[in-house]
Amino acid sequence: MKNKSIMMAVMAAMMLTGCATINAILSDDAAMAELDAMAQKWAEKAKELPEVITPEPDKPTDKESLTVDAIPFSSLQWTCGGFSGSGAKLDVPRISNLSVKSNGMSIKWDVDLRSWGLSHDEWRGALACLFCKVDGQWKGGKFDWISSSRSTRDFANIRDGYNGWSQSDFDRAEAYAFVVVSENGKRRSNVITQGK
């Protein structure tokens, strides 16, 4: 870091003094000593300047997840769908208004998937994950792909027993929870619920 500062000072001095060539400055010991002194002086003055901190974009915190998730994300058991999103971190997409019927469900996108770099109708990249509360436990997982243009999903995969889904668990559920998880399992929306 110090060498970089000195080099920057040398370059600045060259521009200020109008030196003809780098070799002329570097071969003159007196000029080099003067530049070193100037660089040291500038480095000392730089220490007096307030530190510039570039703020990070607003990202939800774990504390925020307590207010945006209808139930704790950690209570979801990834027993179906052949995928585990249990390590996903709360990110920007926000959903609300879960409505589950026997043949399908709907949600409202409050903040859609463009924050993940997905176009409005790009369905590859985000997973629809449903959980059924059965005997006090939230069991479920991935059952379909989803995009910002899709606020509804049918339950054909669940009814067909896709990767461990059980129609009987779905039918006898006390409540439902839904979350959108990125395909790589690293990011997620908030968790929303609906009672029966």
Image (spheres, grey):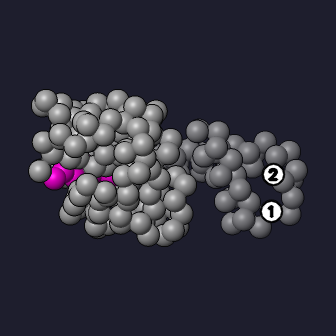
Q: Position of residue 122 (x, y in %)?
A: 54, 63
Q: Is residue 27 visible?
A: yes
SS class of the residue under badge 2? helix
Q: Position of residue 178 (x, y in %)?
A: 28, 49
In this rendered view, identify the residue nearer to me: 59 or 126: 126
Relative to 43, does residue 93 appear above or below in the rendering? below
Specify the amino acid type for callout 2: Ile
Identify the residue under disc 2. 25
Categorize mark 2 by other alpha carbons within 10 Å: few (<14), some (14-19), many (20+).
Answer: some
Categorize mark 1 by other alpha carbons within 10 Å: few (<14), some (14-19), many (20+).
Answer: few
Q: Left or right of 147: which side holds 167?
A: left
Query: Residue at coordinates 68% horizontally, 47% vertically from top-left?
Result: 7
In this rendered view, identify the residue nearer to me: 195 or 54: 195
* Cα separation between marks 2 and 1: 7 Å
Specify the amino acid type for callout 1: Cys
Q: Mark 2 touching mark 1, by CB under 8 A?
A: yes
In this rendered view, identify the residue nearer to me: 1 or 106: 106
Q: Quadrant of residue 95?
A: bottom left
Q: In the image, which disc is placed on residue 19?
A: 1
Query: Residue at coordinates 44% horizontally, 69% vertically from top-left?
Result: 149
